[in-house]
């Protein structure tokens, strides 16, 4: 199993541009999550999904959108990128709810200038 | 509000010594408490968790202690090795599908 994969690994955006961060898992997990991690800080939950077709907001959802059309994929969309969205983004999946047994991808480092 | 925090941002230990990383939490309703290890440039990796109705759980070279009276969580690493150098996060599962992470403690193991 590849586990959780994320693309791209790095990206530089200009203010106002949009992009989609891709996340795919091959473990047939129902739960998927998007976090952002600012330098020297912990992870903040952006959005999560408990199954295909179901998404919900986390702690810091403003400026982001998600969709979950399949069990495997959970893309994160940034509209009108702002410097405050400069961060490392992690996708994770879990066979159950909550932080137990969450499996993280390698992250996407995003810089907005 | 909900918060999970760590007492010390950095910890330096000698190889072979035991390490203790602490965490304070504020939400008494949390179901699980989890420790993650994050190596440089990688995503967090699950180490061990403990359910709220337990006070101690042991894994391979690691032990997690939960003191609900003072809302304190600790991770003990026995015989710390250079490969244990990383940032350690505690996380708190407050609701199904949501979790709250602390800011992390950087553990440095000196050879």
Image (tube, coloured by chain):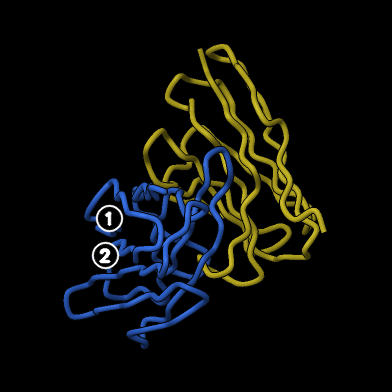
Chain colours: A yellow, B blue
Q: Which residue corresponds to the image point at 44% horizontal and 67% vertical from the top-left?
A: B34
Taking depth in this image into account, of B72 and B78 the one nearest to the observer is B78
Question: Which quarter of the rendering shows the N terminus of chain B?
Answer: bottom left
Comparing B97 with A88, the one in front is A88
Q: Secondary structure at mark 2?
A: strand
Question: Tag 2: Cα neighbours inside 10 Å, few (<14), some, or many (≥20)?
Answer: many
Q: Are marks 2 and 1 in contact (CB under 8 Å)?
A: yes
Chain where mark 1 sits:
B
Extreme residue in the front direction: B111
Q: Are marks 2 and 1 on the same chain?
A: yes
Q: Position of residue A91 (x, y in %)?
A: 62, 47
Is residue B42 rendered to the left or right of residue B77?
Answer: right
Which image quarter: residue B89?
Answer: bottom left
Which residue does the numbered mark 1 point to in the structure image? B5
Mark 1: give few (<14), some (14-19) or many (20+) Cα within 10 Å. many
In this rendering, would B21 be left or right of A48? Answer: left
Q: Is residue A12 above or below residue B17?
A: above
Residue at screen point 22% across, 55% down: B7
Per the rendering, the mark at residue B25 is 2
Is residue A37 shown above or below A113?
below
Whole-number angstrom distance, CA of label 2 to CA of label 1: 6 Å
| Mark 2 belongs to chain | B
Residue A74 at x, y = what percent? 70, 48
Residue B83 at x, y percent in the picture: 52, 53
Determine the secondary structure under disc 1.
strand
N-terminal-most mark, 2 or 1: 1
Give coordinates of residue B38: x percent, y percent: 50, 50
In the rendered structure, the answer to whether residue A33 lies left or right of residue B32 reads right
């Amino acid at each position: 199993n590849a586990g959780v994969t994320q693309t791209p690994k790095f990206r530089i955006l200009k203010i106002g541009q949009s992009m989609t961060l891709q996340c795919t898992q091959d473990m047939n997990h129902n739960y998927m999550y998007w976090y952002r991690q600012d330098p020297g800080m912990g992870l903040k939950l952006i959005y999560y999904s408990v199954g295909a077709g179901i998404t919900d907001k986390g702690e810091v959802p403003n400026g982001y959108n998600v969709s979950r059309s399949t069990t495997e994929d959970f893309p994160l969309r940034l509209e009108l990128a702002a410097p405050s969205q400069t961060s490392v983004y992690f996708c994770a999946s879990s066979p159950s709810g909550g932080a137990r047994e969450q499996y993280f991808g390698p992250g996407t480092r995003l810089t907005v200038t | 509000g909900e918060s999970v925090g760590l007492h010390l941002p950095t910890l330096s230990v000698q190889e072979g010594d035991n390490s203790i990383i602490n965490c304070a939490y504020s939400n008494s309703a949390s179901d699980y408490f989890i420790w993650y290890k994050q190596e440089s440039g990688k995503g967090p990796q699950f180490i061990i968790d403990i359910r709220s109705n337990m006070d101690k759980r042991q894994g391979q070279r690691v032990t997690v202690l939960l003191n609900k009276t003072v809302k304190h969580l600790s991770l003990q690493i026995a015989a710390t090795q250079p490969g244990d150098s990383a940032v350690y996060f505690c996380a708190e599962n407050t609701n199904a599908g949501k979790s709250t992470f602390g800011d992390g403690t950087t553990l440095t193991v000196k050879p």
